[in-house]
Every structure is written in structure tokens, then in C-alpha cells.
Amino acid sequence: MKASQVSNTPGPVLILGDDARTVLPIARSLGKRGAEIHLAWTSRSGILTSSRYIERTHDTPLEPGDAAGTLALLTQLLHRHEIETVFPATENATVFLCRHRDQLPKDVRFAIPNRRAAEVVFDKHRTQLLAQELGVPIPATHFVESQAALLKVLRDLKGPVVAKPLSSTSQLCTEKQFVRVFENAEALRSGMRARPNYPVLIQEHFQGEGQGIGFLARRGDMRRFTQHRRLHETTGHGSTYRETMPVNPELETAARKLIAKLEFDGVGMCEFRVDPKSGRWILMEINGRFWGSLPLATAAGVDFPWLYYQQQHDIDVESSGTYRVGVRARMFREDLRWMWRSWRRHDQRNTGDDGWRISQISRGRLSYDLFRLLTGFDYIDSFCWSDLRPFRTEVSLLASKLLQRKQRPSL
């Protein structure tokens, strides 16, 4: 279909998932263009349901243990509301659709990566093997399948080490699995005995900052992309504060090699770790879906949801790496939590079992980051002038939680 044959108003769209970082940018992007937005597989978050662009929220659940039932309810919903395009907004939703792509209705467009790419990017071990094949640097890694196998590699481990599950979502797509960081081999042995989770990747802890290249690809060709760095990081919930930066040619080359090999078709992000002092870098993983810092890309001038929608409808997206550099955006409540924990130095010994082990910065830089928030220098993920209610709801939820904490009786 040629661009001239496509209506300027998108047809009905269904978004699946409950992550406001990805749901809101998709809903706002397509809703502003007149699309009727539906939402399902969500916990009915007040932040999401308050958006003016989400017209219908459905109680249809994601029940991975009952795939047939979930698919039957999803199909009924799609046909009842004449849904044209489906956008999964979380990893659980994306992985589930990829696993059951052959059972999905053929008359609806699903924004999921191609089969070859999905098989690799949602398996961190296979991603590492692909990177090795292509000569893309990765951290020193051991594939460990049992406690006995772990004991054999302990003697080779020095300094902080990372235990990384093969997938960020459980086998049944019901819960998130977190990276865990341990100060040394003994702490790793003790931690894995207390909470075994095999098979697992045991990796060196690479010092540096997280950087990512978010992209839209068409049959292995990276058509649009942005690069950002993480200013406030967690081990399991991405970054709460980030900034766009000029593209690093080495990282771009690595990303293009990986995307081309996978014949990647869709959106994703190649996640790297970079040592700013030495310039040394490694690939950490590839996310085969909309990523958590998507609102930053939108603020920097690249509307990935709309571009992906166009691509889904066979419109050729112009190849470009143009975007605004130096743009910063943050999650509101989560970044306040991050800064509070950083100021109190809560996470010196946190292994990240809850995904909330955080990177450390100086209090001087922390004060500057807080100043930028208070003076309105940065974008806030949930804030949008044409859709104010999600941000107001988020502020209200934060105030309510703080009030409850204040009224809690002391022991």
C-alpha cells in the first residue's frame, strides 16, 4: 500500500500492557491523530485510565497459563471493536504474542518483531552468542545451569559479579525477573543458594554508564534511531532519568550489524555499557519491544509509535538519525524515589533482588539533578499539555502515599 492510499486518521488501535512509560506515548501519538485507542491486559492503573486518549479499557486479562482462553478472548475483543492494529507495550505482552503468533488473527496487524529476531532477543544467552559471532564486545560470561556448575566457575570470578536471568520475564510471562549484583564470588554463592534461579548467566560487572540506541528497523535496515545515556539507573526498572546524546559511531555500527543479522523488523533498543574514561564498551542486551525511555525519544523529536504504525501499514519510513541532543526526561515518582535512596545511600549492599539496586552519583550532582526537576528544565514522562490528567493523577498518588507514611504510627 502506498502512502497516498492510507487515511490520515488511523483505525482503531489496541494497546496491551500496563507500563505508563510505553502505553502513554503510544496512546498520545496515535490518539492525537484521531485513532480510537483501546487498552487491555492492564491492572487499570489510574495514571493510564485518566488519559483522554484512551477511550476504552477492557478487563480482558493476560493469562499465560491459559493461552487458548487468552487468545480466544483477545480475538473476540479485536473483532467486536474492529481493531486494526495491536501494540504490545510490555515485554510480557510482546513475548506472549510472539510465542503464539501463528494463532493470532490474520486480519489484524500486530506490532511484534519477526520470528528470527524474537527467538534471539528474548533469550539473553542467544543474544550473547550472536554478539560473539559478529565480533561485538560482551562482558566475560559463564552459562551456569546448576549450583554444582556454579561452584566450578567461582574460582574464576573476581570483584563484583552479575547474575542475569536468560529472560527478563518468567516462562509463563507472569512476573519480571531481575538482574542481581553481588560484591564478590562468595556473596554470589550465598545469594544463589538462598534464591536459586537456573539457568543463569554469570558475568563480570562492567564499570560504566548505560547507553542505548533505540531504533525502528525494516527487514534488518535501521531506519530511525536515537541514542541516550542513563543518568539515574536501577538494576531492574531501567533508568528513571536519562538524556539524549550524539550517536557513538562504534555503537551504531554494532547495532546495525546485529539488526541486519536478525533481519529485524520492528522497534527495539540495543543496550550497551560504556566506560566514559577509557571509551571501552560492551553490549548488554537487545530489547525487542518499545523501551522504558520511549518518552525521551518522543521529547527529542522522534515519534517511534507513529513511525512504527506507518511501517505496519506498508508506508516506507525515511531513514534518518536526526533528533535533538541534550534533552532530558524522567519518571516522576520513581526518580524522586531514586534520588531519596541515593541521598540516604540505601543501596550500598542491595543485591537488586527487587530491581532497585541503584547507580551511585555524588551529592553535588544529585543536588543539580533535583534543581533541574524543581525548575522545570526537564521533561516528565507522564506530563503532556494536551493530556494533563495522568500527571495530576501521579502527583495525587504520590501525595497520598506520603500522607499515609506520615500518619503511620511509630513503633
Image (tube, helix red, strand yellow):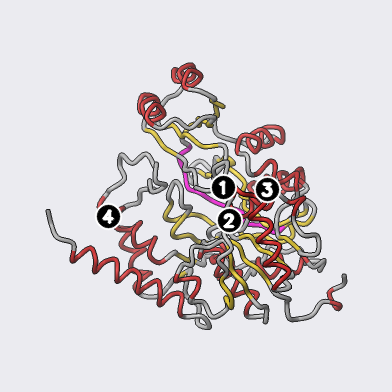
* Quadrant assignment, res 4: bottom right
List the residue tagged with mark 3.
255
Kind of residue sitting beneath label 4: Trp
Kind of residue sitting beneath label 2: Leu
* Quadrant assignment, res 262: top right
The residues tagged by marks 2 and 4 sit, at their Cα atoms, a distance apart of: 38 Å
* Quadrant assignment, res 93: bottom right
Task: Point out the image quarter for the N terminus.
Answer: bottom right
What residue is at 44 percent from the left and 20 percent from the top?
154
Q: Nearer the viewer, mark 2 or mark 3?
A: 2
Circles 3 and 1 in contact, beta carbons < 8 Å: no
Q: Is residue 287 magenta?
A: no
The residue lying toward the viewer, choosing from 287 and 403, is 403
Image side of residue 263 versus residue 48, left or right = right
Q: Which mark is residue 62?
A: 2
Vertical arrangement, residue 181 with respect to residue 245, above or below: above
Kind of residue sitting beneath label 1: Cys
List the residue tagged with mark 1.
173
**Start-end of magenta stretch:** 206-216
What residue is at 46 percent from the left and 55 percent from the top?
239
